[in-house]
Image (spheres, rainbow, N blue to C red):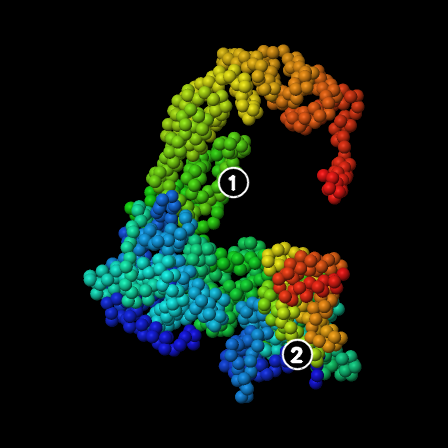
Amino acid sequence: MGSLLQREEMDQINKLAAEEVYNLNKQVVYFPIRHHSPACSYHLKKTIEAYQPSIILIEGPDNSNHLIPILANDQTQPPVSIYYAYTAGERKYVCYFPFLSYSPEYVALLEAKRLQIPAAFIDLGYGSRLESLEDGHDLKKHNEKQSYHDERMLSGSSFIQQLCATLKCRNFDELWEKVFEIEGIRKTTADFVKEVFAYCYLSRKCYDDAALEAEGDLIREAHMRKKIEETKQTHDRILVVTGGFHTYGLIENRSTTYTVKKAKEEKVYPMVYTYQEADQLNGYASGMPFVHYYENVWRALEKKESAPFTKSALTYLPHLLKKLRDKDESNSTADAIEAYSLMSGLAVLREKSEGGAYELLDSVLSAFTKGERSIATNQPIEALRELMTGDGIGQVAKNDLDVPIVRDCKEKCKTHKLQISTTGRNQKILELYAKKTHRQASHFFHCMQFLGTEFCQKEAGPDWMNYKHVNLVRETWRYGYSSYVEARLIEASIYGGTVQEAAAQKLEDMVKELPQHQSHELAKWLLQAIVMGLEELGERLFELVEQSVKQDGHFLSLCQTLKVLTILHEQKRLFGLKETARLERLVDDVYYEAVTKIALQSNPHPDEWSQVAEQLKFLYTISEQKQAEVSREIFSDQLQELLHSDQLPANLVGVVTAILCNLAVLAREEVSRRARAYMLGTPDQILHTAPYLQGVFLVARDYLFYEDALLNDLNQMISSISYDDFVQVVPELRLAFTYFSPMEIIMLSEKVATLFESPVEDVLSPFVDEKTMREARRLDLRIKEEFAKWNLI
Amino acid sequence: METMKPPMEELYAAQLSALRSNDTGAKPPNWLMSPKAVRDFILGTDKPLTYEGEKIEITKKFYGDDVLIERAIVTLAGNRGLMLVGEPGTAKTMLSELLSAAISGTSTNTIQGTAGTTEDMIKYSWNYAMLLDKGPSLQALVPSPLYTGMNKGVITRFEEITRCPFEVQDVLISILSDKVMNIPEMEDGILFAKPGFNIIATANLRDKGVNEMSSALKRRFNFETISPINHVKMEAQIIESQAKMLLKQSGVDIEIDRDVVEILATTFMELRTGETREGYKIDSPQSVMSTAEAVSVYVQSAMTSHYYENKPISLERLVQNMLGAVVKENQKDGGILKTYFTKVVKERAKEEGLWGAYYNEKKWIR
């Protein structure tokens, strides 16, 4: 490193390091670190041993000091993090402060506990930091995942790029590993601190004051300096553990005047974290990559292994082989042996005391890849990367700050045997009708989904809300736990202490916003509540639905409500409904309310025509199931009244006529009589034929088969109308005939064939074959092109 | 002796000697240099080395992935062979020559794989007159490059291994794992490989009609994939240095025109990747638009200009020769080159100096 610099400047830096930074005779010792560096933790432990501090001050938001006992608890297992969230105006900011088992900050906390000395965070809180900066809110993007350890300033400097080229390293991380991790653990602590300080000092020098100020570094350092000064009054041996980038900022003589604006209502919680999220390679600028790999290194260091990196690499090779064999890759132990020997060879060539993460990756790439490098041969290296990142999730010790909803969620997962100790998506298949426990699990999944936690996603199963796939008896869910899920749960904790409570409260809040007179919206939420297994809320909503039905004068809304209630009634066992008598009563009430409004539908809005038709059909099916004669009578009376209206659209005329004929209120011939009336009427009326037939076929397709008159009249109409009218009527007519099944189409063809006295095949085969059609189309296009060329069109 | 193309150990004799005399690193058995010195030989050093009072610059000879070179060197010091794969013209052969020249001091111990390669050519054959005269003996045995490699403990290069028939390739399997060759015709006919022996094979997996390698053979090699260079400046640098060397060898002493090289490199790279530097998609010809091909286009054009017009390279000759390089596989490729001129070159001709002159030569593309 020295060769890059003037010797004099280097001497100055070293002097500074020896006198001001790492001078064990002083009242304050500064220990510069890189976040998540095992070597830093290794030397930090040694420093604590040598210096025997009376207090340890750590770079970390000072509004989270109350969490230190929880983090240092024996039950806590990293990776864990502190979660900060606060709202400024309409924008929401969140930030994570992750701890891995080998993070120097975490090691400092544990050591402080062991030595029974206090430890404290001394940095500005995340919210206060943003609030105090002029452009703070622009600095961090709204709701984007932020890490407390943002290292862009440290690793992005031009000094580092130059250093990488000189030391033949492909990037900053390899450089760091080579100089500070692999060689770092082989140096004395004093030398190690000296070099880390020098490196951080020089990268800091690549930025001017304005850049440091804009990033909020200066104000933070001023705050930390103040805290250190305060501590000096009470303690005589203070160890300060901060990112190396800030060390110089803490010892230099700079008077920064600053005012801290407190962020209002910043939430601070301890929560679990995952290896995946801690891995810098997954997009967060938060320390070192390959977190699981370095954890292995740290474990080896703790066991005082002489070659911890080699040891760590060795643990991966058998795992990698197993993983690859599981995926049917043809890799053998010989490949692992070769990789191991390559690793040592590369370490010698690259002048490293032992092979690190990059040597492991390189050697696996060489020894395990068979053939040209491509997506197809990339399996080994991808699998290794996954292993080196790790898929574990940490654990936070039980505590009062522990968010109850998170605890509840974890307990529920345990009850339902859901795998949440590793990251990655798992599948759960629930047999809704067969097992009660599965129904409960389904309730839990629905609640979690409703709370927007992104914990789970339904892949298959009945969708009651949209009335789709309702014949399915199983539900398939895909789920996975992460700190993201936990963060969302913490946010949802304002609604309640358990997942169900929160879901119920959230739903209730949403219902409050609804207008009372729309019973179908309420009914939909009632169904949602029941799908989520929220019985109590379900009862309250049921009452609300009862009340709103009385206020609801809208025919369609009532019909939709009736539909939801019918679903509930049909599936009462699945949904575990107890008071079915009350439900039946409500179904009757709604049916009555809806049916008595039929006569008012004489002139609905054109957009609602098809919906009204559908609902009439639905009411017809319901009325067929009704035992009481009286309800059927009201239904038919209302329909007759509706049919008398002059303004009734043709498709509704079709529906009503067909229903009434089915109910034997009207004679069967009425259908064809009314059809003839349209077909043989004025040109305007002819156009209504198709909607009318659509209405008829919606309810009763069979008319066409035993009413020959209908077919004859249709034939007559088609042969008599003008070409223009035909073109106008044909799309609607086609639509009307789409209600028929293939079987019925064949039957229909036979009838048409008899009518024309020709073989059935002639009717069934298309009038123009595909080839002719395509040729005609091609010709058409050619003509168009030619016309365009001559500017004729 | 004058040669058309001197081997690497001769071409870079001075650099190799300088590296050897300055080499302090540990050497694998029978290697002439330490792995670090081999890397420096291929990737170059920042400062020149002193050898017999002279400063000798170690030039960069391979451009692309530096880490790949490190892996390749370490592989050769180990138990497995090195397999260099990649598209045609990505300097696989050159790299294998450089490696063997540095490690064993010879790059000529080579098996040139063809569809007609037989097992005899890979292992050994017999001088039949001697065989009849003296019976099976070492005198009557004609060693193959592989035999020589094992016998002397040097690197054996195997060019175009996938061109050889499948069964012939498999001869290597037991030799690579046991490092032993059996000669059943002779009593005590066992040849143990000396330390330092290894194989660098090159294979081009893109060409039609290649023989796929057996997985048993694949297991005995470490694969390194060499990708085409996707950096105009770097490619131009290679074209320049290679063309300079080739022209010098052909006795044509002319300066390399850097602007022309850059145009050539840009054209080749854009046609190869199917994307212009402005980010537009274009069609790619079927022919392999490799750097080696670009070098040969430059050398040919420079030589034609030199001999017929007595001047350094002209764009007219460049386009004429380029046409020959592009239109090889398919007649339609000519159309693709023409479209490239109409769309891309024409647009650049409006603003950039030489591109205008380049566009004027479109007339040669027919």
Please give the residue where the numbered disc 1 appears in the rendered image.
A459
| Vertical arrangement, residue A485 with respect to residue A352, above or below | above
Q: Position of residue B42 (x, y in %)?
A: 57, 74
Please give the residue where the numbered disc 2 appears in the rendered image.
B7
Q: Nearer the viewer, residue A754 or A390?
A: A754
Tell which subunit mark 1 falls on: A
Disc 2 + disc 1, Cβ < 8 Å: no
Q: Could you tell me which quadrant the C terminus of chain A lies in?
A: top right
Q: Residue at x 48, y 68 (%)?
A: A169
Q: Residues within 10 Å of mark 1 (few under 14, many from 20)?
A: few
Mark 1 secondary-structure assignment:
strand
Q: CA distance from mark 2 to mark 1?
A: 64 Å
Q: Is residue B325 found left or right of B20 in the rendered image?
A: right
Mark 2 secondary-structure assignment:
loop
Q: Residues within 10 Å of mark 2 (few under 14, many from 20)?
A: some
Q: Nearer the viewer, residue A744 or A135?
A: A135
Q: Residue at x 48, y 65 (%)?
A: A171
Q: Nearer the viewer, residue A778 or A324?
A: A778
Q: Position of residue A339 (x, y in %)?
A: 53, 66
Q: Residue at x 26, y 66 (%)?
A: A28
Q: Nearer the viewer, residue B203 or A306?
A: B203
Locate residue A335: give its quadrant: bottom right
Q: Could you tell me which quadrant the N terminus of chain A lies in?
A: bottom left
Q: Position of residue A136 (x, y in %)?
A: 36, 53
Q: Position of residue B47 (x, y in %)?
A: 51, 79
The amino acid type of the residue labelled 1 equals Glu
Locate residue A514: give its quadrant: top left
| Vertical arrangement, residue A594 with respect to residue A122, above or below | above
Asked if badge 2 and badge 1 are on a common chain, one would say: no
Q: What is the residue that sits farthest to the left in this orientation? A: A234
Q: Residue at x 50, y 68 (%)?
A: A343
The amino acid type of the residue labelled 2 equals Pro
